[in-house]
Amino acid sequence: MDEDAPNIVVTLIINGIIFVVIPLIMAYRRGYFINFGERLEWLKNILNRKSVYLPEEWTITKVRPLSAFEKYQIQKIAVQFGSYPREGYWAVIFLKSGKKLEYKLGENKGYWIDDIIHKDNILLRKWQKGTQYKYDIIPIIEHEQFS
């Protein structure tokens, strides 16, 4: 029986790596954890009841540049015009994993259909109305500075 104990421990470690660690690494590399921190923050705020005031109209709650991880995942960002029922310009983000994300372009600032926006020149805006969230992208022109 003493001879079997190390084999069981090794088997449990190997199974843990195969069934837990490797799927988490694959999900991370494919970009499934983008904005996951914000979802946890929203859940934490609900559980702690820190935010008594929820805006009744669409309000900008956060403006931020893309993180280094998000920039690494992006292959290119192109501008497209939304077809019915969507209106206006949309930023289509092509990820290296082959997926495609679409965000409304808040201000086009001289970018038109099929223009490519550099991933360092955009800000992601988070809008909130009650418990609903939506995101849009605003491009930064190279000579503009934000603080």
Image: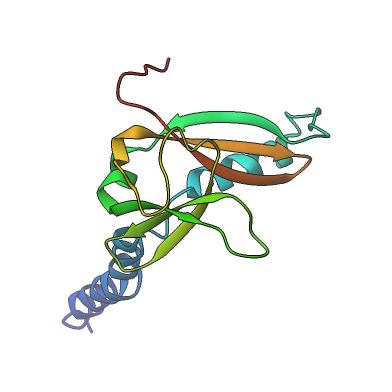
- Residue at 42%, 60% in the rendered image: 32
- Side of 62 where 78 appears, left or right: left
- Residue at 79%, 32% in the rendered image: 54
Describe the colour scheme in one phrase.
Answer: rainbow
Extreme residue in the left direction: 3
- Quadrant position of residue 86: bottom right
Q: Position of residue 22 (x, y in %)?
A: 28, 69
- The foreground one among 79 and 10 is 79
Tell how many labels: 0
- Residue at 51%, 51% in the rendered image: 90
Q: Position of residue 138 (x, y in %)?
A: 48, 35
- Side of 28 where 37 appears, left or right: right
Q: Position of residue 7 (x, y in %)?
A: 19, 80
Q: Position of residue 49 (x, y in %)?
A: 76, 33
Extreme residue in the right direction: 56
Q: Image height check: is 101 above or below 71? A: below
Picture quarter with the C terminus: top left
- The foreground one among 50 and 111 is 111
- Side of 113 where 136 appears, left or right: right
Q: Image height check: is 91 above or below 101? A: above
Q: Image height check: is 4 above or below 98? A: below
- Side of 45 where 147 appears, left or right: left
- The foreground one among 54 and 78 is 78
Q: Image height check: is 133 above or below 33? A: above
Picture quarter with the N terminus: bottom left
